Image (cartoon, helix red, strand yellow):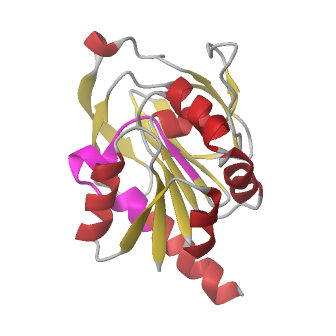
Amino acid sequence: MRVGVLALQGDVREHVALFDSLGVESIRIRRHEDLGGIDALVLPGGESTTISLLLASSGIRPAVEQWVREDRPTLGTCAGLVLLADSISDGRADQTGIGGLAISVARNGYGRQKFSFEAEVESEIDEVPFHGIFIRAPKIMDVGNEATVLARLNGEPVAVQQGSIIGCAFHPELAGDGRLHERLLSMVESRTKAL
């Protein structure tokens, strides 16, 4: 099994290190050709507008959009969540998402950099809370019926899944928590068995 981490901008190294700790090979994705040899894709945190623009200028955007449209295993954290949201309430005019999650997000919904924070996040996949690291984090404003909430902060959704696509407002990779990454890998295994 091999996981690709979109490596245009953001915390790529941290996702690669987490997959290393799980004993899973990961590669950095910079060109559309790189998608051919992977089983899952991670859209990391960073600056969502910058990543959106780099997706277009690098020529990789159509391949990533097709990947998500095909409901292939995908994890988006922070800026990756913004890219996967069907609706961005405060995006810039030149920012376009990929879609795939029936949610609406506010890009910097928890505030600018100085309002970044850490908090215990209630997990709905097991009984162990996540240590949520929120850095200029997007806020999930609305969740459609197609999406399932995986984690909440003060009752509000901060991680969701729809089909094989997971989106998370915080940074589990910075906390060294591999549960969402393992969930991604289990979707790859399920998909492989079904083929």
Query: In front here: 47 or 185?
Result: 47
Magenta-highlighted residues: 166-182
Query: In front here: 7 or 57?
Result: 57
Give left or right: position of 50 versus 175: right
Residue beneath the point at 22% across and 53% down: 176
Task: Name the spot of residue 191 as percent of width and height, x first.
Answer: 64, 78
Query: Does residue 186 sit above or below 151 in this rendering?
Result: below
Query: Does residue 120 sit above or below 175 in this rendering?
Result: above
Q: Is residue 167 magenta?
A: yes
Query: Does residue 89 sit above or below 63 in this rendering?
Result: above
Which of the 4 image quadrants contains residue 115? top left
Residue beneath the point at 67% across and 36% down: 56
Image quadrant where one finds the C terminus: bottom right
Give left or right: position of 114 versus 164: left
Residue beneath the point at 69% across and 28% down: 96
Q: Is residue 59 magenta?
A: no
Which of the 4 image quadrants contains residue 192? bottom right
Task: Name the spot of residue 29 as percent of width and height, x first.
Answer: 50, 57
Give left or right: position of 28 versus 115: right
Which of the 4 image quadrants contains residue 135? top left
Query: Does residue 104 sit above or below 57 in this rendering?
Result: above
Task: Name the spot of residue 101 as percent of width and height, x first.
Answer: 68, 43
Residue beneath the point at 63% across and 64% down: 33
Total labels: the figure holds 0
Give left or right: position of 108 versus 59: left
